[in-house]
């Protein structure tokens, strides 16, 4: 469906240019705040990768303990994601997103006080439980505002939060680790968890005041704009021919499970760059916390640009599968090259940047695929199901990399393992995801 068709529909007296201007207005209002929330979530999820630089020595944890703890987050995430998204559809986005944001902030602060592997595992698990539902909840929430033709671009803008969190998080973590050394009775890695957890609690309270549930309740839209956006979405949602609308339909649809498999492979790469980039940079000979933080931002800056471009180009051409498959192929090449070039700092960082470009560029295009065959409750449950199963890779990848590094003494074998999953994603998308 295009804007012209929407505008020409009965009962909708809005020109295509007016409707497009309204969507731009909505995007400027919602996307920056949602990006900010996800950056906070991402910082609280992956700051353990920077805390690791000192925490493992202080607590006498092995690389395998770290890998298991980093990954166990996704077990809690997996178990509670679908219920959280189905609850969002019933109680609304504001209450759901506020609850999630406040609780993950509290769990992040609690990470500062772990002293044993068991406590480490428990707190990481709880962090996953509390954050469960945020990402698919936002993806679902955006479908309440934007029709299908805008979603790859809108998803791409929102998902720049992955990359922006890496750009911001690295230098910020480096500054905290450097600046909070020997402050008070806490170690610098403990201050990292506390300082990055507090803003999430504050932001969660602000969600209740800032986010409207749906266009009809957005006071910053005119009545005409509210009606136009609501009517356009009603028209699109009424055209459910060929789409699955119940959660049972989504659960029994083989395409949902193939999407989950593809997403598992994509997320394995994302978890790798999120949890292991600081260690990779340290392994290539950089020892300053601040410099590690600054250099770790480079792959995410490149990934941000690639993510926005790939989403916009996919919307422009209407093609999803090849855009996704090429991105994951690039990720595979970059990860293999990183493993081969760990002995050369400059080349390894370039290869890691290539891997990040491919990994991050795949996300916005991928999330446009499920919307092609899911609607209604099936969209709420199906998106959450795909995301929760896919995010199990966030457990598998860090654990495998940690285990392989402990047994071989090198990160290379773990990077090759994740590269294999990225090429598998390319194959699955091309072979099993139907053209639309």
Image: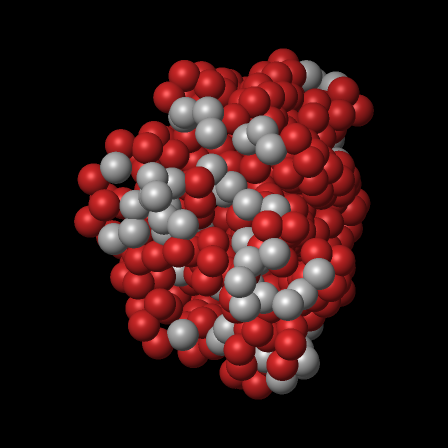
- Does residue 16 appear left or right of residue 255 in this picture? right
Is 339 situated above or below 282?
A: above
- Residue placed furthest toward the top: 340
Q: Residue at x 71, y 61 (%)?
A: 15
Is 207 situated above or below 420?
A: below
- Does residue 397 appear left or right of residue 351 in this picture? left
Q: Is residue 212 visible?
A: no
Indicate the colouring scheme: secondary structure
Q: Residue at x 31, y 57 (%)?
A: 377
Q: Which quadrant, please, contains the N terminus? A: top right
How far across and how far down the image is residue 219, in percent?
Answer: 62, 84
How far across and how far down the image is residue 256, in percent?
Answer: 32, 38
Q: Nearer the viewer, residue 117 or 76?
A: 76
Is 217 situated above or below 121?
A: below
Q: Nearer the viewer, residue 189 or 42?
A: 42
Q: Nearer the viewer, residue 374 or 92?
A: 374
User: Which of the 4 image quadrants contains residue 29?
Assistant: bottom right
User: Which of the 4 image quadrants contains residue 275?
Assistant: top right
How far across and how far down the image is residue 21, in percent?
Answer: 74, 62
Q: Residue at x 65, y 50 (%)?
A: 4
Counting the numbered discs, the total is 0
Is 272 situated above or below 414?
A: below
Q: Residue at x 78, y 46 (%)?
A: 294
How far across and how far down the image is residue 47, in percent?
Answer: 57, 55
């Amino acid at each position: 469906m295009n804007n012209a068709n929407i505008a020409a529909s009965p009962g909708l007296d809005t020109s295509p240019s007016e409707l497009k201007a309204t969507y731009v207005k909505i995007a400027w209002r919602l996307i920056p705040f949602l990006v900010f929330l996800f950056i906070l979530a991402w910082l609280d999820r992956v700051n353990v990768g920077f805390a690791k630089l000192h925490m493992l020595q202080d607590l006498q944890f092995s690389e395998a303990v770290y890998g298991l703890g980093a990954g166990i987050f996704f077990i809690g995430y997996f178990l509670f994601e679908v219920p959280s998204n189905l609850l969002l559809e019933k109680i609304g986005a504001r209450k759901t997103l506020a609850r999630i944001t406040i609780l993950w902030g509290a769990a992040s602060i609690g990470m500062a006080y772990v002293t044993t592997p068991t406590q480490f595992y428990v707190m990481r698990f709880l962090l996953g439980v509390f954050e469960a539902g945020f990402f698919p909840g936002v993806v679902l929430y955006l479908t309440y505002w934007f029709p299908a033709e805008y979603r790859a671009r809108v998803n791409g803008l929102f998902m720049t939060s992955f990359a922006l969190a890496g750009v911001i998080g690295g230098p910020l973590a480096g500054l905290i680790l450097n600046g909070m050394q020997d402050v008070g009775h806490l170690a610098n890695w403990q201050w990292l968890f506390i300082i990055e957890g507090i803003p999430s609690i504050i932001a969660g309270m602000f969600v209740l005041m800032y986010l409207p549930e749906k266009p009809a309740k957005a006071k910053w839209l005119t009545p005409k704009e509210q009606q136009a956006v609501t009517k356009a979405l009603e028209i699109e949602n009424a055209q459910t021919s060929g789409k699955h609308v119940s959660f049972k339909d989504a659960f029994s649809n083989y395409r949902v499970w193939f999407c989950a498999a593809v997403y598992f492979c994509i997320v394995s790469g994302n978890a790798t760059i999120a949890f292991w980039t600081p260690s990779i940079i340290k392994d290539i000979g950089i020892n300053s916390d601040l410099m590690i933080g600054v250099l770790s931002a480079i792959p995410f800056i490149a990934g941000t640009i690639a993510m926005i471009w790939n989403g916009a180009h996919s919307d422009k051409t209407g093609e999803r599968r090849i855009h996704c498959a090429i991105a994951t192929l690039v990720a595979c090449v970059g990860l293999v090259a990183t493993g081969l070039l760990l002995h050369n700092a400059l080349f390894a960082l370039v290869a890691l940047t290539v891997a990040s470009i491919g990994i991050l560029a795949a996300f916005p295009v991928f999330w446009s695929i499920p919307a092609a065959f899911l609607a209604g409750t099936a969209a709420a449950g199906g998106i959450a199901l795909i995301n929760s199963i896919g995010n199990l890779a966030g457990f598998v990848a860090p654990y495998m990399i940690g285990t392989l590094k402990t047994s071989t003494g090198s990160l290379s074998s773990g990077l090759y393992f994740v590269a294999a999953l990225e090429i598998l994603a390319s194959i699955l998308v091309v072979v099993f995801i139907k053209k639309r």
